[in-house]
Image (tube, rainbow, N blue to C red):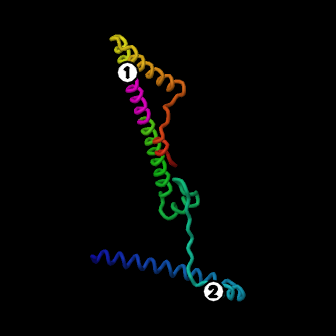
Amino acid sequence: MSSEEKQLANKSGKDETKDRLDDSRELIELFNQLDDEQKEEVIIRIQKHPQLSSISRFWEGPLPPPSALKEYEEVLPGAANRILKMAERQLVHRQKMEKEKLDKIYQVQSRGQHYALLIVGMIAFSGMFLIGYGFEISGLIVYGTTLIGLAYVFITGRRPKLKQDSSSEGPE
């Protein structure tokens, strides 16, 4: 530790000590303002509960309550504005991520529809090809099952669920 760091540490230690002394003096002044009965009550309570207590405050969401913002501002001028800007940046980031996620979902669904069209077209062409070359039963089976599958998807608006799909579903 350099001599400058030691001086800073000593200075900050002195500042803490001075603050504690100021607080102690304020407590003594307040205590002296009490009447004898109140002083006795304070002494009895302190003796019964000598431990220190702490207060915890927490909140949900990106912003603290207005009272906490005011306290931050008193301790560090400009802190409330920085907290608000941080929350605004977080909001913009979250909205950007949600938009990107929706765009990706749209791209995947769109790509799936294009591939499905290509596959159905190839299967339908194969069925017609088989019928054209004299394999009517095989061609009708390939072509018919393709049409029945397409009709089911278009009528119900979804694919049939498999048992494996239900096991991958869970609480999100």
In this rendering, the count of numbered labels is 2
The magenta region covers 104-122
Closer to the chain start, of discs 2 and 1, is 2
Query: Toward the viewer: 117 or 81?
Result: 117
Q: Quadrant of residue 164?
A: top left
Q: CA distance from mark 2 to mark 1?
A: 87 Å
Residue at 57%, 70% (x, y): give it: 55
Query: Could you tell me which residue is drawn at 40 percent across and 26 percent down?
Result: 116
Eyeballing the image, is 48 above or below 74? below
- Mark 2 Cα shell of 10 Å, populated few (<14), some (14-19), many (≥20): few
**Relative height, residue 77 to residue 162 (above, below):** below
Q: Is residue 74 magenta?
A: no
Q: Would you name the residue on which mark 2 appears?
A: 48
Circle 1 crowding by C-alpha within 10 Å: few under 14, some 14–19, many from 20:
some
Kind of residue at badge 2: Lys
User: x and y percent of residue 26 in the render?
Assistant: 58, 80
Magenta includes 119? yes
Q: Name the element at disc 1.
A: helix
